[in-house]
Image (tube, grey):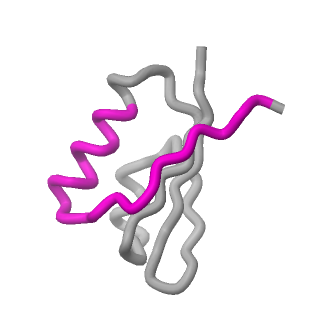
Amino acid sequence: MMTRMMIRVDAELSDDLVAAFPHLTPKTQRATTTLTGDLTDQEELQGVLNLLNSLGIKVVEIVTIPDE
């Protein structure tokens, strides 16, 4: 089962960095970017968080978006 997630980071991600997350939709707002999309499980979420961390990007917020 997929879980819709929003991940907010404290940086404006370049197009190249956004391309590293093809299954997430970016939205940039004044020095932050939110990545929203469906993740299959905790392991996939951890993979996204590990990649952001390895790129030196600080995660500010992670929100689970309820099903409509």
Above or below for 57 versus 6:
below
Q: Is residue 55 magenta?
A: yes
Q: Which percent across, then down, holds residue 36?
A: 58, 49
Q: Which percent across, then down, holds residue 7?
A: 48, 52
User: In the rendered image, which quarter contains the C terminus?
Assistant: top right
**Residue located at (55% from left, 61% from top):** 26
Above or below for 19 versus 64:
below
Number of marks in the image? 0
Residue 37 falls left or right of residue 20? right
**Residue located at (57% from left, 79% from top):** 29
Q: Which percent across, then down, holds residue 57?
A: 26, 64
Q: Is residue 53 magenta?
A: yes
Farthest residue, direction top? 1
User: Quarter of the image holding residue 4?
Assistant: top right
User: In the rendered image, which quarter contains the N terminus?
Assistant: top right
Nearer to the camera, 22 or 44: 44
Farthest residue, direction right? 68
User: Quarter of the image holding residue 58?
Assistant: bottom left
Q: Give, as a single range, the part of the protein colored magenta.
A: 45-67
Nearer to the camera, 40 or 19: 40
User: Quarter of the image holding residue 31?
Assistant: bottom left
